Image: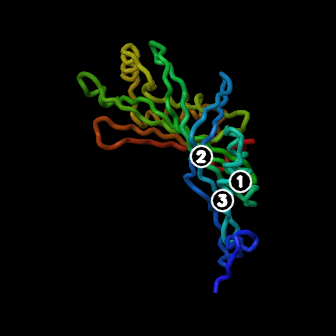
Amino acid sequence: MRKELSLENLSELPDIQSRVDARNLGIDQVGVSSVPYPIQFVSCSNSGESVQSTNGMFDMSVSLPASDRGTHMSRFVQLLRDWKQPLDYVGAVDLCGALRERMNAERGRVQVRFPVFVERLAPVTGESGMLRLDVELDATVDSCRKLVVTVAGPAMSLCPCSKEISNYGAHNQRCRLSASVRFRSEKSSISIDELFQKMEQAASCSVYATVKRSDEKRVTEAAYDNPKFVEDTVRDLALNLKADPRIVWFRCESENYESIHQHNAFARIEIGADGDDGDIG
């Protein structure tokens, strides 16, 4: 017969997760995924520090020794609740380090995805608009502190083949640029806005949240004068990132939302050895 346990004495409640496991198999990652939580993200650039309130989606995990049956899942969410600092690059790694320490784990990992908005001025009228970028901070702490920053956002692509073979016009479409980077160090990192500006330079033209007729004319003609296949875009994007000494590893991608096909076109390049990544913090 099962023993009746009193909630008034928590010490009587069995802790099954802390029992020894006899299967002798360690676990690389165990934790919680898709945890929504409000955050404040801090981005620093030449123009100063900016803070945005946004919604983060967290994946949090630790390694688990072969001897341990389970981990304490509630502690992951408790850590988020207790973390009062705004998140920046270093703060994301600090959060991961706190997770590793709280869980007494050899390795911790925190991934958080969230949108941020950057101001873009229309090219002729200067009309202001807010462009949405999608950001991911992927922090790992073991014997080293490492961070991968991913930024994705929209640009424009115009097909060189369509321009060449058509009597007039050329098909163009919005594309999605994405870059994941590791920085050489905390002091040599790049802000989200600056990184995306580097990415935009690889496309046929930038896109803007607000455009008037004169802006539309400029954007249309700029893309027509700068046609690029998806292969061109990703190669130029890779060259832009490779030329920056602050970046020691990157993976970049462009995906065209094709306007004359039912499929999309994409290309991806990764440069940098796995071991050639800088520390953050």
At x 48% / y 43%, what residue is drawn? 268
Find residue 7 and report its image quarter: bottom right
SS at badge 3: helix
Q: Earlier in the sequence, mark 1 or mark 3?
A: 3
**Disc 1 residue type (three-letter):** Leu
**Disc 2 residue type (three-letter):** Tyr
Task: Answer left or right for 204 relative to 269.
Answer: left
Q: Position of residue 264 (x, y in %)?
A: 36, 42
Numbered tag placed on residue 99 in the rendering = 1
**Disc 3 residue type (three-letter):** Ser
Q: Quadrant of the N terminus?
A: bottom right
**Residue at which label 2 appears:** 37
Task: Answer left or right for 218 relative to 198.
Answer: left
Q: Earlier in the sequence, mark 3 or mark 2?
A: 2
Find residue 69 and report its image quarter: bottom right
Q: Position of residue 262 (x, y in %)?
A: 29, 42
